[in-house]
Image (cartoon, rainbow, N blue to C red):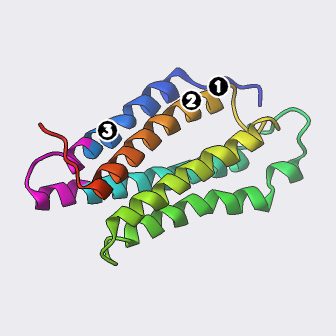
Amino acid sequence: MSKRLPPAAVILGIAGLVPFVALGIAAQSNIVEADSQRFLLGLLAYGAVILAFLGGVHWGFVLHPGALPEGMTEAERRDATRLGLGVLPSLIGWAAMMTPVLGVPEVGLAVLILGFIAVVATEARKSGRAYMPNGYMALRWILSIVVLIVLVSVLGLRLIGAKILL
């Protein structure tokens, strides 16, 4: 895909990290445990929403009439597999959101971690086939690494029972 990534996408993508970082810190802070749990639920919810958004991005690539990369046929662009894979991040996010209902929100963090890894790895595999605008994968890697650092840190701290002193 020869189009360049709009600067607003970079700015908004980076701004989207703020809730991850803020909720991650709040979920592990030395505030009241009930509040810490609420922030953890907020982190799970935000992660689920962002995973759903990432799947929707690929629907947009498929459905946008001007998104046909050079050399790609209309049939390839409307590939049902890509649409199907665009739905999976939503399902992974939903599964993560269901774990607190079962009493194990830490498993939800692990599900989100696996979901973000799977999405960026799948996108990286497809990026060589010109399915995305220039710069998209560089931004996705940066954003994904920060998100994964936050999620892995929160999960690790919760598993060892540590808190961040604020």
Circle 3 is placed at which residue position?
Answer: 21
Q: Name the residue located 44 percent from the left edge and 25 percent from the top edge.
A: 11
- The answer to whether marks 1 and 3 mark residues whose Cβ atoms lie closer than 8 Å is no
**Cα distance between the residues tagged 2 and 3:** 17 Å
Circle 1 is placed at which residue position?
Answer: 135
Percent position of residue 137, x then y:
64, 32
Q: Quadrant of the N terminus?
A: top right
Local packing at callout 2 (Cα closer than 10 Å; few below 14, some 14-19, many 20+) is some
- Report the span colored magenta: 25-39
Q: Which mark is residue 39?
A: none
Toward the viewer: 54 or 144? 144
Left or right: 140 in relation to 129:
left
Front: mark 2 or 3: 3
Toward the viewer: 71 or 65? 71
Q: Is residue 38 magenta?
A: yes
Q: Amino acid at mark 2?
A: Leu
Relative vertical location of residue 22 with respect to residue 138 in this rendering, above or below: below
**Cα distance between the residues tagged 2 and 1:** 6 Å
- The answer to whether marks 2 and 1 mark residues whose Cβ atoms lie closer than 8 Å is yes
Percent position of residue 119, x then y:
61, 50
Give SS at disc 1: loop
